[in-house]
Amino acid sequence: MQTEPYEIFAIRYAHLGNRHPAENFILADPHEFASDLDYFVWIVRRSDRLFLIDTGFGKEAADRRKREWLRCPIESLRLLDVAPADVSSVILTHMHYDHAGNLDLLPRARFHLQDREIAFATGRCMCHQTLRAPFDLENTLSMVRYIYAERAVFHEDHAELAPGFTLHHIGGHSAGLQVARVWTKRGWVVLASDASHFYANFEQRRPFPIVYNVSEMLEGFDTLHRLADSPQHIIPGHDPLVMKLYPAPSPALEGIVVRLDVPPAQ
Ligand SMILES: [Zn+2]
Ligand SMILES: [Zn+2]
């Protein structure tokens, strides 16, 4: 492919430990290993383009939900020489609190999301506490304001935002969940976000228990395999292993940022 490859960076901004296996897998064995959760935002860039994928959550949400907040994900963009005010294209994989906060910190951004996600986040499903729990009302209200301010870009199913950078609807975990497929120097990498929280979800095809449609989630694992050049090209959304398998772009960013456009260790 002639297209200039993209660099991909994951910025780790929060953490949650002491997980029970049933919080990570439907029908988990209570004795099995229960991975912690890391929280990320992702930067995808090349000489002429820059995309921010997801916007994380702020300190208030971290305190309220008892997550360990390590740093502001938007301020952390500066670690990669990205000024938040310069970010114009933001992809929201879905509207859960840990992916769609901090929108007000991106004054020039337009937000790309699936039609089905805003319908889900503002419709009848939000009458149910189980489905509503991962959403923060303030984020949804902000997003609706940005729609009225013409700062939303809606997609249905898949969309090519630039050569070598496409979005694909998966659903499952959230009705309008989308993933990004990115052309890199090692081939097609898929940023799965919550289509697979952990490697184990897509490798073993075991659904995560926060789910809107189990069938779509299971089909989504197949979609990830189809979109990526190999299982090593799929990046799960919350797995602490990502920080172990991929290198930091510089010694100063060790433990904070890893590069995903290079092959993983092992
Ligand atoms: Zn989610
Ligand atoms: Zn998430």
Image (cartoon, helix red, strand yellow):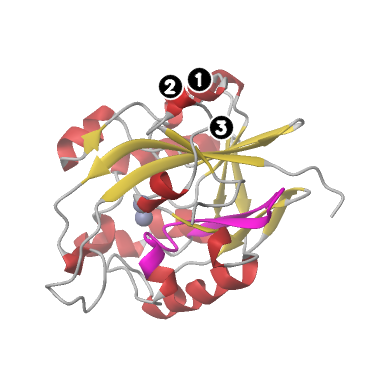
Compare marks 2 and 3 and give the one earlier in the sequence. Answer: 2
Distance between mark 1 and mark 2 Cα atoms: 6 Å
Q: Nearer the viewer, residue 14 or 66?
A: 14
Neighbor class of circle 2 (other Cα within 10 Å; few <14, some 14-19, many 20+) is few
| Place of residue 86 in the rendered image (x, y in percent of width and height, measured from the top left) | 61, 21
| Place of residue 212 in the rendered image (x, y in percent of width and height, measured from the top left) | 35, 69
The residue at which mark 2 appears reads as 75
Q: Which amino acid does label 1 sit on?
A: Arg
| Place of residue 216 in the rendered image (x, y in percent of width and height, measured from the top left) | 46, 76
Point 38% across, 69% down: residue: 201
| For residue 130, above or below residue 204 | above
Q: Can residue 238 be seen in this view?
A: no
Indicate which disc residue 78 carries: 1
Q: At numbered mark 3, what does the secondary structure look like: helix, strand or loop? A: loop
Distance between mark 1 and mark 3 Cα atoms: 26 Å
Q: What residue type is labelled 3?
A: Ala
Q: Can residue 69 be seen in this view?
A: yes
Mark nearest the camera among 1 and 3 is 1
| For residue 258, above or below residue 26 | above
* Residue 179 within the segment the image draws in magenta: yes
The answer to whether the residue bearing label 1 lies less than 8 angstroms from the nearest atom of ligand 2 is no
Distance between mark 2 and mark 3 Cα atoms: 24 Å
Mark nearest the camera among 2 and 3 is 2
